[in-house]
């Protein structure tokens, strides 16, 4: 079972992958997937730090891991953190599954997300997320 430090290291690694993907003009949209997983690992680290258990030990059998995480964040953190996390998750879903849920027909993710939009997620939204987590948890989670 990964521990607190393992999750922090994975979050850092995923963030670096996001930054690397931003340098590519063809696959930059996948930076949204890796930044989502970076945010996920930061929350996992906080769960282990607080409860000394991982999410599989805390979630109900009828919950998916994604549903558990969203519910956990809504209950334990500010609305700002939840909204940022949710935006990372939704953007990741668009990129991974090649469609936008509100569209009537599939829209390729590289057409949906312009590079400037992805840069905003990585360079603005993610730092805000880590600053808020740091403030609310009293742990330094700025990576």
Image (cartoon, rainbow, N blue to C red):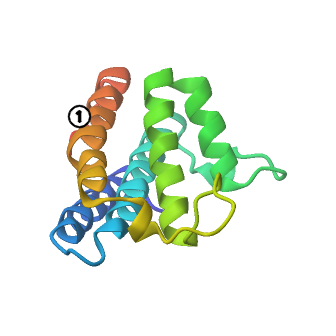
Q: In the shown orientation, is residue 3 left or right of residue 31? A: right
Q: Which residue is mark 1?
A: 140
Q: Which residue extends farthest right? A: 62
Relative depth, front residue between 33 and 139: 33
Q: Residue 137 location, x and y as percent? A: 37, 26
User: Residue 20 falls in which quadrant of the image?
Assistant: bottom left
The residue that appears at 66% across and 35% down in the rendered structure is 71
Q: Residue 105 location, x and y as percent? A: 66, 67
Residue 46 drawn above or below residue 64: above
Looking at the rendered structure, the number of numbered marks drawn on it comes to 1
Q: In the shown orientation, is residue 19 left or right of residue 81? A: left
Relative depth, front residue between 71 and 103: 103
The residue that appears at 64% across and 56% down in the rendered structure is 101
Label 1 residue SS: loop
Q: Which residue extends farthest left? A: 23
The residue that appears at 30% across and 63% down in the rendered structure is 14
Q: Residue 15 location, x and y as percent? A: 26, 58
Q: Is residue 48 visible?
A: no
Q: In the shown orientation, is residue 4 left or right of residue 135? A: right
Relative depth, front residue between 56 and 72: 72
Q: Is residue 44 visible?
A: yes
């Amino acid at each position: 079972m990964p521990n607190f430090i393992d999750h922090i290291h994975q979050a850092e690694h995923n963030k670096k992958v996001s930054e690397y993907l931003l340098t590519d003009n063809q696959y930059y949209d996948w930076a949204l997937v890796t930044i989502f997983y970076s945010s996920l690992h930061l929350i996992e680290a906080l769960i282990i730090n607080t409860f000394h258990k991982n999410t599989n030990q805390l979630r109900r059998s009828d919950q998916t891991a994604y549903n558990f995480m969203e519910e956990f964040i809504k209950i334990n953190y500010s609305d700002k953190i939840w909204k940022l996390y949710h935006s990372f998750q939704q953007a990741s879903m668009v990129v991974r599954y090649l469609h936008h849920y509100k569209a009537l027909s599939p829209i390729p993710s590289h057409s949906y997300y312009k590079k400037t939009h992805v840069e905003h997620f990585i360079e603005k939204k993610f730092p805000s997320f880590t600053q808020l987590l740091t403030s609310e948890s009293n742990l330094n989670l700025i990576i």
